Amino acid sequence: MSPPRRSSDLPAPRLARAILLAALLSYALLTTINILSAGVSRAAEVTGAVLLLVILGLQLLHSSPGANRAPLRRRCLTLGVQALLTYLPLLVFHAFWGAMAGYLAGSLLLLLRPRVAWPLYGLVGVSMLIPPVVDGRPVIDSVYLCQTSLLTGLVVFGLSRLVELISEVQAARGELARMAVTRERLRFARDLHDLLGFSLSAITLKSELIHRLIPAHPARAMSEVDEVLAIARQSLADVRRVASGFRDMSLEQEINSARSVLDAADIDVRVKVHLGALCPQVDTVLATALREAVTNLLRHSNASHCDIEAVEEEGLVRLVVENDGVDPAYRDPSPHSGSGLGNLHARMTAVGGRLESGRGKDGTFRLLAEVPANTPSETTAEVREIVFPANGSAA
């Protein structure tokens, strides 16, 4: 099997236009030769050459991309002029001018709607049966002129449409490239928001805790410093992975990180996990949802209690994060606030999941993320179940 053709081997719009122009000039040259061999006067030959140039100009206009979108009056006017220049010279040059009917047939297909164009195209071809008969030529000449006129019309139509299609494909390729760049920028911005929002909040919180612990509990302060350094190193590694386009996250690791950070903020945490092995895509999107939920909790609330639940039921993996510290008066002063949940919604939609979030009447805030599980790996996976009591050890 031959290797796939590269896009750089395809004809560019300039090459396609050159091929169309070469074809039109070739038909015009044949007509010029016919005129010179028709035995007419020098004045008639010059007149025929001028008319031929006018028809060629009209055909180039009709074959240009977007010509069929011109106003109907303009199209009818140019087609009418071309029809007159196609049939009137037949009175002088007879069948020697017949090749110009192919231009007219192609123009009809290019400029008019199919239900009108195709019957007129056929009518032009049939009309070319008459000149050879008038000249007293054999019937085979009439059939030949009719067939060549129809064939020329198809060639003109096909090459003109090819130019337009290649131009559109070229424009579409450029638009796709711009869209790919835009998507990559959005991905990079989204991932940076999801990563650094949590990491910076955790570093800030733990730094404040270290500041309070240094006078009375220097040993624990040193331990917290080690955690801050670990978070900073992990953030740096995450940013590098985002830049390279590869970043897998673990929901279980994010649950442990969230519990550590919330404990440092003196927030009671209860975690329940009942999951099988998750595919990397599901694992990453749920870990991202948990990270965003904890980040919002630390930045936008004064919670004292938080419940985190991750369970798998009937082929769906559900993550629920609920806290009791909604601050209705809080307004984020940053100009780009509020993009986190929008990012999460886009991620959930991409994996066929859904995202719900909102405030409860009792002053709580609840985030629900639900995505389909990857059943092939989960049917044989060992299920792990962990229940953490509030600020306690695993039960």
Image (spheres, rainbow, N blue to C red):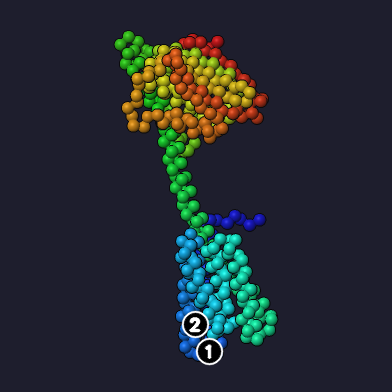
Q: Earlier in the sequence, mark 2 or mark 1?
A: 1
Q: Residues within 10 Å of mark 2 (few under 14, many from 20)?
A: many
Tell me the residue that label 1 is attached to: 40
Locate residue 230 relative to residue 382 in the image: left or right.
left
Q: Nearer the viewer, residue 68 or 213?
A: 68
Q: For residue 9, say whether it is visible.
A: no
Judged from this view, the residue extending furthest toward the left is: 215
User: Tags 2 and 1 in contact by the CB under 8 Å rule?
Assistant: yes
213 in relation to 192, above or below: above
Q: Tell me the amino acid under the disc marked 2.
A: Gly
Q: Nearer the viewer, residue 43 or 388?
A: 43
Locate residue 216 relative to residue 153 in the image: left or right.
left
Percent coordinates x, y for residue 377 in the rendering:
63, 28
Q: Secondary structure at mark 1?
A: loop
Tell me the residue that label 2 is attached to: 48
Residue at (61, 21) in percent of width and height: 313
Image quarter for residue 112? bottom right
Percent coordinates x, y for residue 14 in the rendering:
47, 64
Q: Secondary structure at mark 2?
A: helix
388 in relation to 346, above or below: above
The residues tagged by marks 2 and 1 sit, at their Cα atoms, a distance apart of: 10 Å
Q: Nearer the viewer, residue 118 or 275?
A: 118
Percent coordinates x, y for residue 19 in the rendering:
52, 68
Image quarter for residue 305? top left
Q: Tell me the amino acid under the disc marked 1.
A: Val
Residue at (41, 15) in percent of width and height: 325
Q: For residue 112, say whether it is visible.
A: yes
136 in relation to 221, above or below: below
